[in-house]
Image: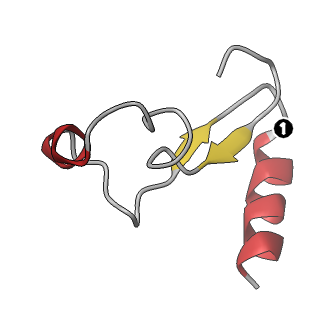
Amino acid sequence: LGGVESLIEYPETMSHASMTEAARREAGITEKTIRVSVGIEHPDDLVADMRQALE
């Protein structure tokens, strides 16, 4: 989201929190939505980090 590092965020309460719930739903943003912004890290590192986070 503007930087070179990868980030995972919860748009319902972060980037899209100012939208009404109806507008978020219309945009496809639900309580189960996550936003992944991929940075410049090596893809293998990103995959390893995601696997570790999900274990």
Residue 18 on image: x %, y %: 41, 31
Tell which of 18 and 4 is nearer to you. 18
Residue 6 picture quarter: top right
Residue 37 on image: x %, y %: 61, 34
Q: Is residue 36 left or right of residue 39?
A: left
Q: Quadrant of the C terminus?
A: bottom right
- The answer to whether 20 is drawn above or below residue 25 in the figure is above
Q: Is residue 47 left or right of residue 26?
A: right
Q: Residue at x 74, y 58 (%)?
A: 47
Callout 1: helix, strand or loop?
Answer: loop
- The answer to whether 5 is drawn above or below residue 29 in the figure is above
| Neighbours of disc 1 within 10 Å: few (<14), some (14-19), many (20+) | few
Residue 4 on image: x %, y %: 81, 19
Can you identify the residue that label 1 sits on? 42
Residue 23 picture quarter: top left
Name the amino acid, label 1.
Answer: His
Tell which of 28 and 45 is nearer to you. 28
